[in-house]
Image (cartoon, rainbow, N blue to C red):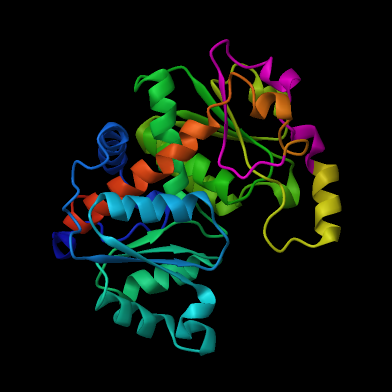
Amino acid sequence: MNYESGGLKDLVSTDCLSRADVEMLLDTAAIYANDPLRDSKFLANQTVVIYMNKASTRTRLASETAVAHLGGTPIFVRGDELQIGRGETLPDTAKVISGFAKAMIIRTYAQDDVAELAKHSSIPIINALTDDDHPTQLLADWVTIREVFGKDVAGRKFTYVGDGNNMANAWLLMGAILGVHVVAATPAGEWAPDAKIVERAKKIASQTGGKVEVIHDAKVGATGASVLYTDVWMSMGDSEVIREKKIKDLSPYAITQELMSLTAPDAVFMHCLPAHRGEEVSAEVMDGERSIVWREAFHRRTTIQALLFHLVRGDLKGSNW
């Protein structure tokens, strides 16, 4: 492993990755899509801890399957099953898990918790969702996008519409890393993407030739776009008061057939799921012929498998944005 010589040990956030890292991961994931057992002995007799504080369908199934396809044993634990719930520190937890597992996948709330675990572990830590970021989802998204449009996406626009949440943040960062034109069309104010992350994405784009835009008109965002992407409006734990306000503020950003009609002729619809038909997306779009959400969900496994393979081997170099 080349951690000590400057390699990337952990995937703490999307912008940990360099353009070359992303290209390597996407290429390997594409191979695993067709040959999932190619490296079926890579994690033989090894374990990977999958720690989740948030409910999950795709991330949990994709992670456990990815570990199994690499020949390892996944150990799934919920937040209340570790001593963290009784006051054990994150550094202590990281050191203990490092003695048993080859890697750890974590889905939790605070971004700082992932960084703390990574700092004190000797094994790769993979961020499988926080309130700020969702890097594993974006890798799955871009494998799927490349299946549809190929690697040459010059002149195309990729638009996220809706709540400026962790998905919007990750959408802008990954687009910037890949040097493409990415847009987040969200309400202004409290539902806009994190301003610091937007500036970070713009800085990265200035080095890669990408273009990052945050606008507040869904129709402008949709016009000519090759992808319309959205996420649920309600986050885990949102109160009824917040729900009512979000519905009111975000209703103009729902992806409908009318909005899809403004996109490029070959445009597709994407969603990280779960979807709430009738809120952020209409049933007609979600279940329509331009929707590629199920293939996108499939690639959660291929990309997590690629991440485990390359992080454990120490292949990824990390970014210097």
Name which residue lies at 34% across and 41% down. 302
Q: Position of residue 91 (x, y in %)?
A: 37, 82
Residue occupying the point 80% across, 49% down: 246
Position of the N terminus, as image quadrant, is bottom left
Res. 275 in view = yes
- Which residue extends farthest top? 265
Q: Residue at x 71, y 22 (%)?
A: 259
| 94 vs 66, nearest the viewer | 66
Residue 321 visible? The answer is: no
In the displayed structure, 258 sits above or below 298; it is above
In the rendered structure, which segment of residues is drawn in magenta? 250-276
User: Horizontal placement of 256 versus 181: left or right?
Assistant: right
Q: Quadrant of residue 37?
A: top left
User: Is-magenta flag for residue 208?
Assistant: no
Residue 242 image offset from top left, x and y in percent: 81, 57
Q: Is 308 situated above or below 186?
A: below
The residue at the far bottom in this view is 87
